[in-house]
Amino acid sequence: MYNQGFGGPGFGGPRPGFGGPRPGFGGPGFGGQQQQFNNNQNDDDEWEYVTDDEGDFIEDENGNILTPQEAEQRGLVTRSDGTTDRGLGKNLLIGGAILGGLWVMNKQLKKKKRVKKANPDNVPYKWVEFTGTYPANTVTVTNSQLGKTFAVARGKYKDGIHCGYADTKNKNMYTSYGGEEVTLKKYEVLTCPANRVQWVKCTNPANINASKAVIGGYEKDGLELYVTKCKRDTVDYFGKTNKKAYCAYYGFDGKEFRINDFEVLLFN
């Protein structure tokens, strides 16, 4: 088993904006083939839309979610070079390189950001906000050597959601980022019937069955993180991995550690 302090740039280092590629922009500048308006997103079971001042989608007066190109087709926004007179009843520019240009909103609309749902549909597990007590069906491990019980947990950090473990005695959560251990006070715990999850040995994250893996969080670019169990000496700690990694990562004693021989949590 390979288990050492992580001294490189660190798991979860800086990546481009949250959410990864989005439909309708990110390629060449506006003017190519237009995307046909369709309010029924194919992946609505995976994503949700939240109001955001710098959102990349637009919600019209009927609640339909549109890309800037779709909104332009309906006359709701206008492509701009940034010199448009804002004194003509126009709202502030929807700006940024992520759109490949600038847009002016022609009427009062809501800007939206597309983010992953906290709890995917059609799975037996659920992430629940920790409010001081741990639910009876929290996924845990008891370490007799330490006399402690750890719960699978996750929390927000550096524009992402990172999984790790919560110490049920001191009620702190521990994960890792950029070579360091991270301690969080606000977090969620994983709940699931005991017979609906199982730990499976893993030595190559690229081979993880993503359709059955418990999603423990996301990097800020939308890269999925999976829940892992990492053994240090005789003690089990919960950590994280992703399909682009070659190992799992967990926080301990102020540092981020990596391990090549670990277990990943799957549901059935």
Image (cartoon, rainbow, N blue to C red):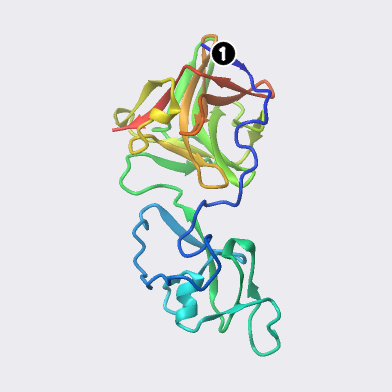
Across and down, in percent, residue 67 comes to: 48, 69
Q: Is residue 149 left or right of residue 253?
A: left
Identify the residue shown where x is 60% and y is 32%.
11
The residue nearer to you, when weighing 40 against 186, is 40
Q: Position of residue 6 (x, y in %)?
A: 65, 22
| Picture quadrant where residue 23 is located | bottom left
Q: Quadrant of the C terminus?
A: top left
Q: Is residue 170 visible?
A: yes
| Residue 132 seen in render | no
- For residue 125, above or below residue 116: above
Residue type at the position of mark 1? Leu
Write the residue at 59% across / 65% down.
Answer: 100
What residue does disc 1 label? 146
Residue drawn at (50%, 42%) of the image:
223
Q: Is residue 49 above or below residue 135?
A: below
For this view, does 172 lie left or right of residue 224? Answer: right
